[in-house]
Amino acid sequence: MQKNIVSYQILFFFFFVFLSCSHNVTSRTSAPGSPAPGQAASSAPCIIYKTRSDYAHNVPVTLNEKKSGLTSYPGVKDLMFQGKLAYPTELAKGFLLDNRGIGPNVAFLDYTYEQYQKLDQVPSIDQLMKHVTDTDPVTEMYNCGPRSQYKDVENDLNKMINSGNLNSCKKIK
């Protein structure tokens, strides 16, 4: 049953990404935010965001539209990005660059990446919901296009942020 729920959640995620992005999306079985086998990490979207509190070390999950249940959550081994834990990259003026595959309905668990990765298995959905710290943690979120359009993602995004020029990014929230 849990495998079916996870399969539907993965399909929902890719459907959302397909509708909200202008580049091709390849179906994958790996975690959202991590590249599919054979796919370069640079083709992932650049999602930048700010949060109400510091959740940079907390595991992100996706809530439904009513924020009453989970639609997506990582497996205990799905927290890696380019060989490291997929913490967001700190950018200028308090922005973070997503490395997990978050969206506008993101919430954060009280589990840190380290704690979650050490679990033997993913807790039940009911248990995960009890670990949600904030159902509306994001104050601003932008999709700045595919990573592949940037020569140096971090520096290029910092220049855009510092200049106050996020006009080329699509405001999500």
Image (cartoon, grey):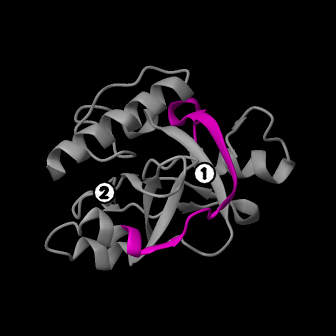
Determine whether 58 is above or below 16 in the image: below
Number of the label disc, if any, that sits on residue 113: none
The residue drawn where x is 62% and y is 50% is 48
Q: Residue at x 83, y 41 (%)?
A: 165
What amino acid is labelled 1 in the image? Glu
Q: Secondary structure at mark 1?
A: helix
**Number of residues whose C-alpha sits closer than 10 Å to that of mark 2, classed few (under 14), some (14–19) or many (20 or more):** some
Instruction: From the viewer's side, name the closer residue of 31 and 91.
Output: 31
- Give the residue pinned by disc 2: 74
Q: Which residues are magenta?
A: 129-152
Instruction: Name the amino acid, label 2.
Output: Pro
Kindly state the secondary structure of the residue where label 2 is placed: loop
Give yes or no for residue 148 being in the magenta stretch.
yes
Residue 148 position, x and y percent, is 51, 31
- Distance of label 2 from label 1 (alpha carbons): 25 Å
| Mark found first going from the N terminus, 2 or 1 | 2
Residue at 44 percent of width and 61 percent of height: 60
Q: Which mark is residue 154?
A: 1
**121 versus 78 height, above or below:** below
Q: Nearer the viewer, residue 138 or 157?
A: 138
- Does the segment drawn in magenta span residue 115? no
Residue at screen point 15% across, 47% down: 3
Q: Is residue 134 left or right of residue 7?
A: right
Left/right placement of residue 13 relative to residue 52 reads left
